[in-house]
Amino acid sequence: MPKMLRLISYDITNNKKRTRAAKILEGNARRVQYSVFETFLAEGELSELISKILPFVSSEEGDSLLVYRLCGNCSEHRNAWGSSVIDWEEPVII
């Protein structure tokens, strides 16, 4: 399955859980804002990543995890200014 650009955002109230989720994401994605990450993954890779983060997301505490798939056409029309500019055509070292 082809890789696609993904936008991942979280809102986790517990500091310890939030830090652990962020560390997992930092190992698999690029942080573009405090709780927003972009990554280029295939479906299976995304499922594996989500399964690592979900234990830290508690709906009872009002937490959320949002994942958006950006199609090729949509990702070509992505605009970014400042330090959040990412060129997915360039090699990524994580």
Image: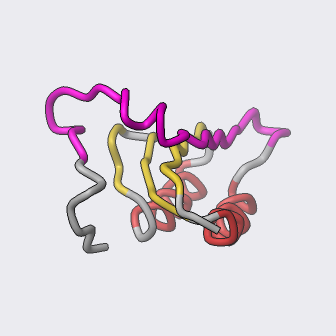
Q: Who's the residue at 54% across and 45% down the image? A: 8
Q: Quadrant of residue 36?
A: top left
Q: Who's the residue at 67% across and 69% down the image? A: 52
Q: Quadrant of residue 90?
A: bottom left
Residue 38 is one of the magenta-drawn residues: no
Percent coordinates x, y for residue 24 in the rendering: 50, 67
Going by the image, does 93 lie left or right of 48?
A: left
10, 81: nearer the viewer: 81
57, 75: nearer the viewer: 75
Q: Give the colour scheme shown.
A: secondary structure
Percent coordinates x, y for residue 91 in the rendering: 23, 68
Going by the image, does 19 lie left or right of 2?
A: left
Magenta span: 59-86
Going by the image, does 60 lie left or right of 16?
A: right
Q: Residue furthest front?
A: 73
Quadrant (top left/top right/bottom left/bottom right) for the C terminus: bottom left
Quadrant (top left/top right/bottom left/bottom right) for the N terminus: bottom right
Percent coordinates x, y for residue 92 in the rendering: 27, 68
Residue 75 is one of the magenta-drawn residues: yes
